[in-house]
């Protein structure tokens, strides 16, 4: 028989009861009566109030790993509000090819591309996770000849259109516009920036001078 003590604030405190032949047990089997301290080698530590699991790195957050109580681990965080994607197209080398059809803008200068989500071949951004995204776009357009077309810019999530802005007059000296929308996406949704022009003679089609397109998460689901 011995005495069971614990070190508290540098002082060993006697926490034994009446003593016994086996006051401390280490192992997976539940100890018999008389044992006052048991180290269970077959159980997973629970996250008690005020305690955190070991490890982790700067910038990581504690996140649930399953629906089981106390199941949590350090994980990387995609900060809400930070840019997930930003790209532009500059120069007047892209002519809107046909009228009365939506065309994805072929962005050629990708600046921010978190997780390599940009699908260059199809000019689409692939959502890495579900949530709400704020999409912003701006464009400056020039007519190749005098005309007054009906011109629209929209965000497309698959086959669903979200109208951004619209113009009824674009001149040979240029016309600039911008807008933003918040839309909901599911993981792996494909989002693109598209433009549309009403029927015009090919000689009057619109040249792109500058277009920007950005995506940021503002909420998760």
Image (spheres, grey):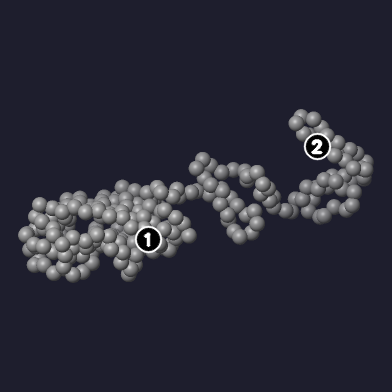
Select label 1 or label 2 by which is in front. Answer: 1
Task: Identify which residue is drawn at 66% across, 49% down.
Answer: 47
Q: Which residue is mark 2?
A: 6
Please tell me the numbered disc located at residue 183: 1
Q: Tell whether 168 sits left or right of 7.
A: left
Q: Secondary structure at mark 1?
A: strand
User: Which numbered disc, 1 or 2, marks the residue that appears first in the sequence?
Assistant: 2
Q: Are marks 1 and 2 in contact (CB under 8 Å)?
A: no
- Residue sitting nearer the eye, 216 or 54: 216
Question: Where is residue 181 drawn, in percent x and y?
Answer: 33, 58
Q: Which residue is the extreme one toward the top? A: 10
Task: State whether residue 121 appears in this view.
Answer: no
Task: Identify which residue is drawn at 77% across, 50% down.
Answer: 40
Q: Tell whether 116 sits left or right of 166.
A: right
Relative to 208, residue 54 above or below: above
Residue neighbourhood size for the residue with mark 2, other residues' Cα within 10 Å, grouped as few (<14), some (14–19), many (≥20): few
Q: Secondary structure at mark 2?
A: strand
Task: State whether residue 64 appears in this view.
Answer: yes
Answer with the quarter of the image where residue 175 lies: bottom left
Q: Tell whether 5 sits left or right of 127.
A: right
Task: Identify which residue is drawn at 40% across, 59% down.
Answer: 127
Question: Where is residue 105 drawn, in percent x and y?
Answer: 24, 59
Q: Quadrant of the N terminus?
A: top right
Please tell me the numbered disc located at residue 79: none
Question: Number of labelled discs?
Answer: 2
Question: Where is residue 110 drawn, in percent x and y?
Answer: 29, 50
Task: Identify which residue is drawn at 38% across, 52% down.
Answer: 216
Residue neighbourhood size for the residue with mark 1, other residues' Cα within 10 Å, grouped as few (<14), some (14–19), many (≥20): some
How far is disc 1 from disc 2 in space, using C-alphas?
57 Å
Question: Where is residue 220 drawn, in percent x and y?
Answer: 46, 57
């Amino acid at each position: 028989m011995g005495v069971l003590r614990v070190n508290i604030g540098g002082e060993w405190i006697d926490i034994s009861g009446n003593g016994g032949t086996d006051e401390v047990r280490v192992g997976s089997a539940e100890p018999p009566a008389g044992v006052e301290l048991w180290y269970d080698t077959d159980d997973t530590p629970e996250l008690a109030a005020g305690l955190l699991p070991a490890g982790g790195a700067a910038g990581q957050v504690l996140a649930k790993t399953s629906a089981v109580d106390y199941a949590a681990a350090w994980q990387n965080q995609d900060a809400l509000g930070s840019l997930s994607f930003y790209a532009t197209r500059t120069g007047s080398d892209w002519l809107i090819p046909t009228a009365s059809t939506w065309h994805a803008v072929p962005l050629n200068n990708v600046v921010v591309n978190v997780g390599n989500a940009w699908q260059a071949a199809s000019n689409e951004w692939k959502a890495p996770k579900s949530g709400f995204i704020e999409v912003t776009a701006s464009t400056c357009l020039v007519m190749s000849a005098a005309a007054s077309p009906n011109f629209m810019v929209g965000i497309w999530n698959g086959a669903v259109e979200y109208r951004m802005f619209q113009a009824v007059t674009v001149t040979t000296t240029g016309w600039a516009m911008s807008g933003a929308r918040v839309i909901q996406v599911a993981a792996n949704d494909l989002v693109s920036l598209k433009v549309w022009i009403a029927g015009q003679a090919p000689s009057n089609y619109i040249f792109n001078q500058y277009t920007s397109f950005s995506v940021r998460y503002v909420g998760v689901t």
